[in-house]
Every structure is written in structure tokens, then in C-alpha cells.
Image: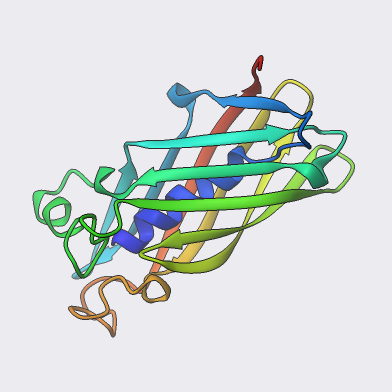
Amino acid sequence: MRRLFLTVLTLAIATLSSAGSLWAMPWGVDKGKSEITFSGVHAGAPFEGRFEDWTANIEFDPAAPENAVVLVTIQTASAKTGNSLYDGTLPGVDWFNVATFPQARFEAFGAEADGSGNYVLNGKLTIRDHTVPVTVAFQANDSEARADSTVTLQRLDFGMGSESDPTGDWVSLEIPVTVKLIAHPSAK
């Protein structure tokens, strides 16, 4: 479950991504319209959750997407499902292990453009000191960047639940993480 949360957070960061060179304008995330969510299945029942505390630093110039820089930091203890059992388990040693790994991090340097306002951000998501490549699609123009992208993470790639449920008998091995993000240029 925690792996899913971190994956969702990473996707959200990637979506907000794009940044330019040292002269690129920073972009600010509209937190009221942006979220990083995750989902999965526990004991046959679907669940959903969200990361309540995350930040994104984005530098982006649509004219030079190859210079984009996106850094997203997610507070792993902020993963919430609304289910007291799940919310009590996620911070534990076998899942997010928030005492040792309080943050998940997504980093991307450079975006690829198709020439019609669509971009792909190839980055790295780190959870519990395990790093995997993550690709996030987004759209952008000079005044707005928008992502509504889902990435499916393998929780065992991050060592999440490897002791208590390594075969996925209880918690699904695949955790879809969805990043819905809106960002706008902001003054330096």
C-alpha cells in the first residue's frame, strides 16, 4: 500500500514537471486542483488513498522542454485512505517505514515534446532508498501545465510489504498512482 502511495506522489511530481534552464521560469502548483492518489486491492476489496503533504519545484520553458527540472517531495506519513487499519499499517517498517524514510522523491531533468503541447517527463521515483524509472505525460503551453496521468507501480520494487505479503495474497502487487496536477508560471 505504501508503495502505491509513493508511486502516486511521484507521478504527481512528474506531471507538474517541466522546467527550463537556469533562466526558465518557476511554476507554481494549484494545490486546490491538484492531487496524488493511489489505489489497490486488500483482501479482495478495492481501496483508494491520497498523499496529503507534498511539494513540487518546477522549472519549465515550453520553448526549451529539454531543460525542464521537476523535483517532487512527498511526506510518506501523509498517505491516507480513510481506513484506520490501512492508515495505521502504512507508516510501519514493512511499508513506508516513515521513521527511517520520511520522504519519497521524484526527480526529472528534461521533458520530451511532440510539437502540439504534449510532453513526456522521464524521471526517477525513490521510495525507501529504492529508485525506479517513472514516465509521466502532461500537456502545457505558456500559461498552464496540466497532468492527469496514471502510473502503475510494483510495490515490491520499493521493498514495500516484502516481509508481510511478498506474494500479493493480501495486498495487490500493482499499485496505480494517479497524478492530477495544474501548474502556472510564477514570478521569481
Query: Which quadrant would residue 7 be assigned to in this image?
Result: bottom left
Residue 120 in the image, given as x and y percentages of width and height: 72, 51
Residue furthest to the top in view is 187
Q: Is residue 55 above or below residue 11?
A: above
Residue drawn at the location 71% of the way across and 37% of the way down: 19
Q: Residue at x 43, y 43 (%)?
A: 36
Give left or right: position of 128 versus 24.
left
Residue 176 image offset from top left, x and y in percent? 44, 59
Please determine whether, in this image, residue 43 is positioned above or below residue 112: below
How many numbered marks appear? 0
Picture colour scheme: rainbow
Residue drawn 67% across the image and 43% down it: 69
Which residue is the extreme one toward the front?
22
Instruction: Report the quarter where the C terminus lies.
Output: top right
Quadrant for the N terminus, please: bottom left
Provide residue 31's location: percent of width, then percent of height: 45, 25
Q: From the viewer's perspective, is 34 left or right of 103?
A: right
Looking at the image, residue 53 lies above or below residue 94: above
Asked whether, in this view, residue 69 is left or right of residue 82, the answer is right
Residue in the image at 21% along x and 81% along y: 163
Q: Position of residue 35 (x, y in %)?
A: 44, 36
Question: Camera-side residue: 53 or 176?
Answer: 53
